[in-house]
């Protein structure tokens, strides 16, 4: 292996031209694994919307299974995925997602974000750095119940871990087929293991700290989850445990920080490019389509690091083509 093979270069096994030659549904091989590629709006909608249950599986490479396990939300399947996802959505709503209390906090973070931009004094800079920081602080408040200070060493390492992890999943390194050798080989995956250990260690310490608190109405995600673990003690099919809690917290940061930051960065780009619509009002949202920026940005732009990879949980058909289970 030379320096090129050890780099974090994006890995794209499928050229867009293949769809033009072979149609909207075709198979390509990634190593020994057959992958059915869907191209075009109606084909993707048929699979991931109209038949979402059949395509609800999430395939895991040996490395992902080793690093994340089949825990949490992003890397779990079946009953675990449904139970963890349902709890996360309900708890985040209960903690204020979409409510006035969280809106006030977001306004405060937005004001600090604008001030951070202002302090650049018109010099070229990467707005993503400021946006990721603000987004992670909001998620940190929801999860841990405290607001990270910018100079907090763990917070700085958390931001680095998020950036590295999201870049890593787009490389050929996460498509390993030899997990028994992976821990022994040099390469960027070793940095992934280091970040994993540091972040999980901090979350474990936070869980222990929350356990020592006097019982009261939970006000942050970890306390709510610990209460749910106690509540589900006698449930034989419960997936609520500390291992899943640690992974769910990681998932909230990975899933929430990157998509939010990327969406806002695209929004800034479009505002800069289309100067004619800047300043077209903010008095009545229903009468001002220009203020519906987030939905339009996500319609127009790519805001996720990797494409939606799914696995069939049962044999099915897409656009008339048979797709076998798994």
Image (spheres, rainbow, N blue to C red):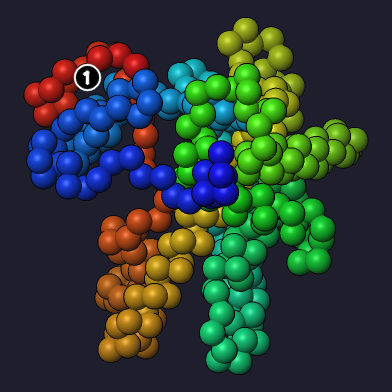
Q: Most extreme residue toward the top, as rendered? A: 236
Using the rendered view, name the quadrant where residue 121 is placed: bottom right
Q: Give the quadrant of the N terminus.
A: top right
Residue topped by disc 1: 323
Residue found farthest to the front: 2
Question: Looking at the picture, how far across and down is residue 9, in whole percent?
Answer: 48, 51
Indicate the position of residue 6 as horizontal and vertical percent values. 57, 45
Q: Secondary structure at mark 1?
A: strand
Is residue 19 among what the camera can see?
yes
Q: Quadrant of residue 116?
A: bottom right
Of the 4 image quadrants, the one containing the C terminus is: top left
Residue 274, placed above or below residue 126: below
Residue 115 against residue 122 in the figure, above or below: above
- Asked whether residue 94 is in view, the answer is no
> Who is closer to the viewer here, 290 or 103?
290
Q: Residue at x 61, y 75 (%)?
A: 113
Q: Which residue sits at x=63%, y=41%?
A: 187
Furthest-bottom residue in this view: 121
Q: Nearer the viewer, residue 313 or 85?
A: 313
Q: What residue is shown at x 67% (from left), y 18% (from top)?
A: 232
Q: Is residue 127 left or right of residue 137?
A: left
In x, y percent, where is residue 15? 25, 45
Instruction: Count residues near mark 1 (Cα–Cα under 10 Å), then give few for <14, some for 14-19, many for 20+.
Output: some
Closer to us: 191 or 99:
191
Which of these two is toward me, 146 or 178?
A: 178
Q: How many marks?
A: 1
Q: Viewed as shown, does residue 143 lie left or right of 297? A: right
Instruction: Using residue 235 as the reference point, say whether residue 209 is left or right of it.
Output: right
Q: Position of residue 66 (x, y in %)?
A: 62, 25
| Residue at image point 38% right, 82% down | 272
Q: Image check: 112 left or right of 103?
A: right
């Amino acid at each position: 292996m030379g320096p090129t093979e050890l780099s974090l270069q994006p890995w794209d096994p499928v050229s867009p031209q293949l769809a033009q030659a072979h149609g909207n549904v075709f198979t390509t091989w990634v190593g020994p694994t057959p992958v059915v590629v869907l191209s075009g709006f109606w084909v993707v909608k048929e699979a991931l919307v109209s038949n979402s249950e059949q395509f609800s599986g999430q395939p895991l490479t040996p490395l992902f299974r080793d690093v994340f396990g089949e825990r949490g939300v992003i890397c779990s399947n079946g009953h675990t995925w449904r139970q963890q996802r349902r709890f996360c959505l309900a708890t985040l709503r209960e903690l204020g997602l979409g409510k006035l209390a969280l809106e006030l906090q977001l306004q405060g973070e937005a004001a600090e974000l604008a001030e951070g931009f202002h302090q650049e004094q018109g010099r070229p800079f990467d707005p993503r750095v400021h946006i990721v920081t603000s987004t992670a602080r909001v998620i940190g408040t929801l999860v841990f119940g405290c607001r990270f200070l910018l100079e907090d060493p763990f917070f700085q390492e958390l931001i680095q871990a998020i950036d590295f992890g999201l870049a890593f999943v787009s490389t050929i390194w996460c498509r390993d087929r030899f997990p028994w050798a992976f821990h022994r080989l040099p390469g960027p995956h070793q940095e992934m293991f280091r970040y994993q250990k540091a972040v999980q260690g901090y979350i474990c310490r936070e869980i222990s700290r929350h356990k020592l608190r006097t019982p009261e109405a939970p006000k942050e995600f970890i306390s709510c989850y610990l209460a749910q673990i106690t509540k589900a003690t006698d449930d034989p099919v419960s997936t609520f445990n500390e291992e899943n809690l640690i992974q769910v917290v990681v998932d909230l940061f990975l899933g929430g920080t990157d998509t939010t930051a990327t969406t806002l960065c695209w929004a800034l780009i479009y505002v800069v490019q289309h100067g004619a619509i800047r300043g077209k009002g903010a008095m009545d949202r229903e009468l001002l389509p220009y203020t519906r920026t987030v939905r339009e940005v996500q319609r127009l732009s790519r805001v996720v690091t990797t494409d939606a990879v799914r696995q069939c949980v049962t044999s099915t058909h897409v656009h008339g083509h048979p797709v076998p289970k798994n």
